[in-house]
Image: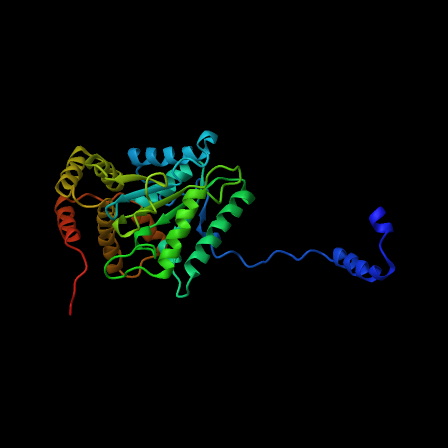
């Protein structure tokens, strides 16, 4: 009351303007959705709902996430988890779905997002992405983990062909800062972990993922993992069918996990060709046909597996 009573006469017009400003309705939030909004997945929204769970990798992910929640480890545990391994072994799918199963929401960070023609552009994108994730955590009252897919293909990687650029150095420096400061954090002040997946991290600056900043896990699906995946995909119903799939997996044990889904798709493609050969089929009838179990013809399976194992890029120059 004293402050109001002591306002001078000449200050009253300014006070009047201020009062008018206060009476105006607040500016509504922008109706333009964030470019990152589609990259958030919530628990239950799995990339592969029927996927096989790799126990060792699942355990490593849960361990890393739980460390971020423990108050006694606040700011002390590694912020990053690096999952390295061969192509087509389900690293990113498992990182995402295991986090969702553990109750975290996931913000997916594609490698292609960290690119810019302008100096500092990539770090600006990364800062915006992290700010969006932190705001999403506060709004949703939910813990979020960042999953950076194929990070070894991002701007932070450099080999003899690509070399280092100002942008790659700036992104690396920002990530090192984020590892050391553990900022931003989730809504409950727990750590916001970041999981990186990739095939070749030797091209990334060693200081970024040094001890104290990152924990490492090498993902190597076992023969039993591949058998389980093949059984789930082909659904053998008889003893003979199971023997066929087991012999096939043992013969092609060096193939990736993705090989078996591709082989199953090859089998479905043959069924599709048969439907198309009869003329343009009714969609509902074709869908019903596709839902029926596919007979496991040993000769056909071996031929398809042999052809699939030889499929790859070729040069016609």
Instruction: Say how the picture is coloured.
Output: rainbow
Viewer-proximal residue, 307 or 85? 85
Viewer-proximal residue, 13 or 32? 13
Q: Vertical placement of 311 versus 233: above or below?
A: below
Q: Vertical placement of 161 versus 109: above or below?
A: below
Viewer-proximal residue, 67 or 6? 6
Horizontal placement of 309 versus 93: left or right?
A: left
> What x and y, as percent, mark residue 23?
76, 56
Horizontal placement of 97 versus 228: left or right?
A: right
> What x and y, as percent, mark residue 284?
36, 52
Viewer-proximal residue, 177 or 298? 177
Residue at x 16%, y 46% (from the top left corner): 301
Residue farthest along the top direction in this orientation: 72
Residue at x 61%, y 56% (from the top left corner): 29
> What x and y, as percent, mark residue 66?
42, 33
Q: Quadrant of residue 283?
A: bottom left
Residue 247 seen in the figure: yes
Residue 150 seen in the figure: no
Total marks shown come to: 0
Horizontal placement of 4 versus 126: left or right?
A: right
Residue at x 48%, y 48% (from the top left corner): 133
> What x and y, as percent, mark residue 125?
45, 57
Quadrant position of the C terminus in the picture: bottom left
Residue farthest along the bottom direction in this orientation: 317
Residue at x 20%, y 34% (from the top left corner): 238
């Amino acid at each position: 009351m004293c402050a109001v009573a002591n306002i001078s006469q000449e200050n009253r017009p300014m006070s009047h303007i201020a009062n008018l400003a206060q009476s105006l309705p607040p500016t509504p939030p922008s109706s333009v959705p964030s470019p990152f909004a589609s990259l958030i997945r919530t628990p239950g929204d799995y990339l592969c709902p029927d996927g096989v769970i790799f126990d060792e990798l699942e355990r490593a992910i849960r361990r890393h996430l739980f460390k971020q929640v423990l108050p006694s480890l606040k700011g002390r545990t590694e912020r990053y988890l690096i999952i390295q391994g061969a192509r087509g072994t389900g690293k990113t799918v498992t990182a995402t779905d295991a986090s969702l199963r553990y109750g975290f929401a996931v913000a997916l960070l594609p490698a292609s997002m960290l690119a810019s023609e302008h100096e500092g552009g990539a770090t600006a994108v990364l800062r915006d992405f992290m700010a969006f994730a932190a705001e999403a955590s506060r709004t949703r009252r939910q813990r979020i983990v960042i999953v950076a897919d194929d990070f070894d293909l991002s701007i932070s990687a450099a080999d003899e062909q690509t070399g280092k650029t100002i942008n790659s150095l700036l992104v690396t420096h920002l990530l090192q800062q984020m590892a050391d400061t553990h900022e931003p954090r989730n809504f409950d002040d727990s750590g916001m972990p970041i999981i990186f997946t990739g095939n070749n991290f030797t091209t990334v600056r060693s200081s970024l993922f040094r001890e104290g900043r990152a924990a490492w896990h090498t993902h190597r699906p076992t023969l039993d993992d591949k058998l389980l995946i093949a059984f789930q995909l082909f659904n053998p119903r008889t003893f003979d069918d199971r023997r066929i799939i087991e012999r096939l997996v043992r013969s092609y044990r060096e193939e990736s996990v993705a090989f078996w889904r591709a082989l199953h798709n090859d089998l479905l493609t043959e069924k599709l060709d048969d439907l198309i050969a009869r003329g343009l089929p009714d969609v509902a009838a074709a869908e019903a046909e596709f839902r029926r179990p596919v007979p496991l013809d040993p000769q056909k399976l071996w031929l398809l597996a042999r052809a699939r194992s030889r499929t790859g890029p070729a040069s016609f120059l």
